[in-house]
Image (cartoon, rainbow, N blue to C red):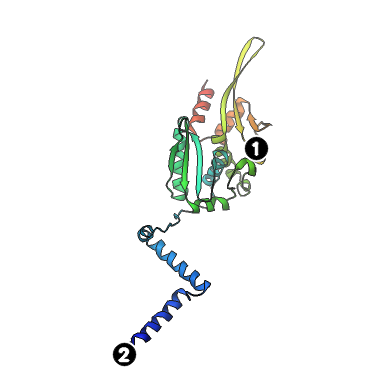
Amino acid sequence: MAGMSLAARARLGGLRRVELYGNPGTPEGRSKGGRKTISYLHQNPNLAREVGFIIRKEIECPVRCAELAELIGVILGDGGLPGNHQLTISLNSKTDKEYLVFLGKILRKLFSVNYHIHPRKNCNGADIVVSSSNLVDFLLKQGLTAGNKVKNQVDIPNWINKRFEYQKSCVRGLVDTDGSFYRHRYNSNGKNYEYLKLCFTNCSRPLLNSVWRILKKFNFEAYLHGDQVFIYSRQGIKRYFEEIGSHNPKHLNKIRKFLAN
């Protein structure tokens, strides 16, 4: 470029810029330039923060597996996607304290994301919150629906129903969040009796029917009444504990104490 005039050099620089970023005077050029800028800022996050540019958090996108199916069950139970950039899971900060820790580990293992636990004021509720548009996009692709779950009448995603292992894991997540185990006591002919009940409650009819069908598929004596699915028998509870199980210590402790007695 020796001997070239300043104007000639500027012209060559301009042509090179158009080659790299497109003509800034056209929509295509502006789009190409924008993509280049975004790519550059993604590679330089500190600069992006300095100029006030918001970068989507990168996440791991796991393959479909039993742990992901269980998390889907948890979200269908006590979780939700209230918007396009946030996942929330609502639990009891006291009775589900250990379970909150378990779910946090699962989120980190599957997606390599950080989470926050926000206690609710004037009650024992707490929300696990993950803010990530990429995570929400991924979960939507797995069959979840954003917004009100009852209004949308959500159901278990089709890919989970294609494998028994995934079905069991999803039901585990659902029962660990929207299920309960409690002692039912009654008197007959002057004698007192009691037995443990499993009760899953949900206001989405498709989801309720799916849980009932899956339990029946695995030969559980499950009963569907209104917005609840029940397993009554001691043997049924024992089988559920052995074959499907629970990761919620609140449920595990109840089952173990009852079976021990």
For residue 56, which quarter of the picture? bottom left
Describe residue 58's horizontal placement relative to residue 174 as left or right: left
For residue 224, which quarter of the picture? top right
- Is residue 148 visible from the viewing direction of this image? yes
Taking depth in this image into account, of 66 and 132 the one nearest to the observer is: 132
Q: Mark 2 points at which residue?
A: 3
Q: In this view, does 19 lie above or below 244?
A: below
Nearer the observer: mark 1 or 2; the answer is 2
The amino acid type, in three-letter code, at marker 2 is Gly
Which residue is at a point 53% across and 43% down the rendered structure image? 71
Q: Position of residue 135 (x, y in %)?
A: 50, 51
Q: In this view, does 150 lie above or below 136?
A: above
Which residue is at a point 43% across and 42% down the rendered structure image? 116
Q: Position of residue 140 (x, y in %)?
A: 57, 51
Quadrant containing the N terminus is bottom left
Q: Mark 1 points at which residue?
A: 208
- Is residue 247 visible from the viewing direction of this image? no
The residue positioned farthest toward the top in the image shown: 190
* Disc with the residue nearer the chain's start (1 vs 2): 2
Q: Is residue 22 above or below residue 169?
A: below
